[in-house]
Image (tube, rainbow, N blue to C red):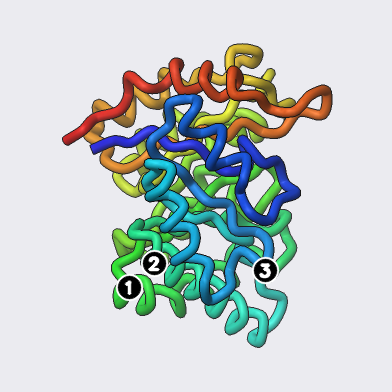
Amino acid sequence: MIGLACATLSAEGFDYRDFAATFEMLPAAGFRYVEFNLWDAVTMLPSSGRDLRERCEQSSLTPAAVYGHGFGAESEFDIARDVAHKVRLMEIARELGCSRVVATGCTRGEGGGLERTIRTLEKLLPAAEDLDMLICLENHAGSNLESVEDYARICEAIPSVRVGICIDTGHFDASDVDMDQLIDTLGERVLHLHVKENRGRGSVDFRRFGEGTTDNHHILERMVRLEYSGYITVELSPQRDRPTSVDDLRKAHEMFVNFQRET
């Protein structure tokens, strides 16, 4: 199965509390699946999962994943705090009925670097096994999770299939990373997909879909050939010149809906 989801940031931007725009715009644009960006403490309250699930049922949306703050721990205490945060994300995901938790890393060289991220993941793995969760590590330009080599180190250190890669196509373009090389070497560890539009390789210049140069279809076609099963999440980064519209989301849905697979 492959489901086409949309991230809440696509409708809400980065300043939100109650996801009102998400529940209005995503169904209107044709989306059936939603990925919740839970970056504010108010979205992680004890009642959060239950409330969001009820609203999803009312809006005919199915939760695909939850996305939280990135991995980063300057001290042993920070590792414990990071683990507790990710466990709470897993609990919310379970309450929502989904099994994917997504997070990226700190700015490169900060937050204890890649080694401390690996140590945090090692401590988090038993909870992922107990709660039947997948930990999807998303690449960001300029972060500790950015290159093929970064992911190769993580996959070697943590061979569990519960820890893997969330490809963000736009951020890989912005980092000038060869996504074909990543798929050739680590394609079996890809657990989640984010499609984003960037203009030009090697620098961050996120655009609306159709206005950039990221070859999203090529990457999705490769993953389909590898019999990828999971979700493709549309991330339409908020633009400063005007808010995201239902038409923007509908265009993204139309571009990628043919990659959905019911079984």
Instruction: Give the residue pinned by disc 1.
Output: 131
Earlier along the polypeptide chain: callout 2 or callout 3?
Answer: 3
For the N terminus, the image quarter is: top left
In the rendered view, tell whether residue 240 sits above or below residue 16. above
Element type where label 1 sits in the image: helix
- Which image quadrant is residue 244 in? top right
Earlier along the polypeptide chain: callout 3 or callout 1?
Answer: 3
Tell me the tag on residue 143. none
* Percent coordinates x, y for residue 123 in the rendering: 46, 79
Instruction: Give the residue pinned by disc 2.
Output: 95
2 and 3 marks in contact (CB < 8 Å): no
2 and 1 marks in contact (CB < 8 Å): no
Task: Specify whether residue 97 is in view.
Answer: yes
Tell me the tag on residue 41. 3
- Which image quadrant is residue 54 in? bottom left
In 3D space, how far apart are the residues under numbered discs 3 and 1 (Cα atoms)?
Answer: 22 Å
Residue type highlighted by circle 3: Ala
In 3D space, how far apart are the residues under numbered discs 2 and 3 (Cα atoms)?
Answer: 17 Å
In the rendered view, tell whether residue 80 sits above or below residue 209. below
**Residue for point 32% across, 19% down:** 258
Residue type highlighted by circle 2: Glu
Task: Specify whether residue 177 is in view.
Answer: no
In the image as oriented, which residue stretches furthest toward the right? 241
Instruction: Give the mark count.
Output: 3
